[in-house]
Image (cartoon, rainbow, N blue to C red):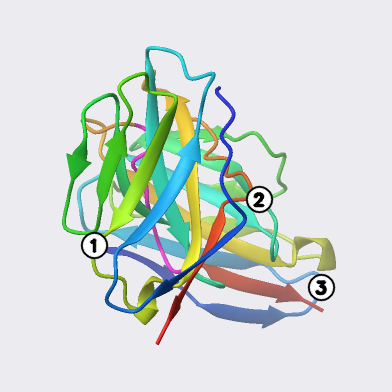
Amino acid sequence: DAKTTQPPSMDCAEGRAANLPCNHSTISGNEYVYWYRQIHSQGPQYIIHGLKNNETNEMASLIITEDRKSSTLILPHATLRDTAVYYCIVRVDDGSARQLTFGSGTQLTVLP
Amino acid sequence: EADIYQTPRYLVIGTGKKITLECSQTMGHDKMYWYQQDPGMELHLIHYSYGVNSTEKGDLSSESTVSRIRTEHFPLTLESARPSHTSQYLCASSDPTANTYEQYFGPGTRLTVT
């Protein structure tokens, strides 16, 4: 599985867009990019995933560069409840149950 | 919001007691998972199930057992709790038609064994 690199922390003003980067320069062609977040003491929350096209859902947008070596998760209007650790992971989806392993992630703090 | 529930949310129990942690989901997902996570540490998969009557051990060895008699229910049992079992236990599920790593988590059970 490809390794990912994320900044350890970021701040964002409430109401502004939060742009969280992730580098995955060793990603292979069949690996998906997934984003999760974990609010303190709660279970992880799936946000979004993509293969090569940009994706958008009700929570966020995912922008994947054309060479797929990096991606950005965008929370368009951050709220205080978006304060959490955000994890970018890269995995092949072969249909088998596999351990969901997070790296160190980015601590996003949304400031009032 | 995903509809996956865990009870109890918090449990403090003495050594040697038998406990069952409940997990239920109303999404009709075939795949379900149990993870163990200590504060500030990684998730570790301890059990998973592909459907009714299917259970497998995960990557982290655990003394707990699971059962899957109904699609919506995936309880975890510890026959004799020990202080080393103190941890947070997280249940998750996924739709088999979706990507494997699109998993929906419950709120977790924080277990303390004294």
What kind of residue is marked 1?
Pro
Q: Is residue B4 left or right of residue B83?
A: left
**Residue to which mark 3 is pinned:** B15
Callout 3: residue from which chain?
A: B
The N terminus of chain A lies in quadrant: top right
What kind of residue is marked 2?
Glu
Q: Main secondary structure of the magenta part?
A: loop
A65 drawn magenta: no
Question: Percent x, y for residue B90?
Answer: 52, 59
Label 2 CA crowd tier, 10 Å (few <14, some 14–19, many 20+): some
Whole-angstrom CA distance, mark 2 to mark 3, is 25 Å
In this rendering, the answer to whether A59 lies above or below A112 is above
Q: Which residues are magenta?
A: B100-107
Q: Which mark is residue B42?
A: 2
* Residue shown at the point (30%, 22%) measured from the top left: A66
Whole-angstrom CA distance, mark 3 to mark 1, is 48 Å
* Residue shown at the point (43%, 37%) measured from the top left: B49
Label 1 CA crowd tier, 10 Å (few <14, some 14–19, many 20+): some
Question: Do the dots labelled 2 and 3 sit on one chain?
Answer: yes
**Residue to which mark 1 is pinned:** A76
Q: Is residue B23 visible?
A: yes
Q: Report helix, strand or loop for mark 1.
A: loop
Specify the quadrant of the image occupied by residue A96. top left
Q: Nearer the viewer, residue B44 or A17?
A: A17
Q: Report helix, strand or loop for mark 2.
A: loop
